[in-house]
Image: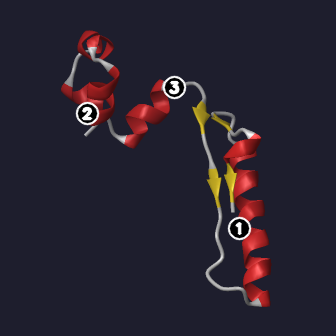
Amino acid sequence: MALKSRYTLEQIEAMDLISFFRESTFDDIYHSVKILRVARYARESTKHEDQQKALENQIERLDDMIYRNMNYTMQDGHRYT
């Protein structure tokens, strides 16, 4: 249930950060911030050659999704493989 359906705007603005996150849904958080700092995590389950190509595709798709979304920002140090 959305935060706005349970609280008034004044109550939401008066919440401390911990209370806000505790009571919020993902959508509440997503729509309350202008920029989300994100990290990319990609992994392979085995060392087989087929998995290497799958890992490359996974990294490419994740990076593309992050760069296409104007609300996401990712620093170089936040790429985990």
**What amino acid does circle 3 point to?**
Val
Q: CA distance from mark 2 to mark 3?
A: 16 Å
Q: Quadrant of the N terminus?
A: top left
Q: How many marks?
A: 3
Along the line of sight, the residue nearer the viewer: 10 or 5: 10
Residue 21: x, y in percent? 33, 32
Q: Secondary structure at mark 3?
A: loop
Along the line of sight, the residue nearer the viewer: 53 or 8: 53
**What amino acid does circle 2 point to?**
Glu
Q: CA distance from mark 2 to mark 1?
A: 33 Å
What residue does disc 1 label? 58
Q: CA distance from mark 3 to mark 1?
A: 27 Å
Whichever of callouts 2 and 1 sits on the residue coming sooner in the sequence is 2
Q: Tell me the residue at 73%/73% (across/down).
A: 55
Q: Tell me the residue at 24%/29% (across/down).
A: 5
Vertical relation: 36 (above or below) 80: above
Which circle marks residue 43 in the picture?
none
Crowd band around label 3 with a 10 angstrom C-alpha radius: few (<14), some (14–19), many (20+): few
What residue does disc 3 label? 33
Q: Tell me the residue at 62%/47% (across/down).
A: 39
Whichever of callouts 2 and 3 sits on the residue coming sooner in the sequence is 2
What residue does disc 2 label? 23
**What amino acid does circle 1 point to?**
Gln
Whichever of callouts 3 and 1 sits on the residue coming sooner in the sequence is 3
Residue 54: x, y in percent? 73, 78
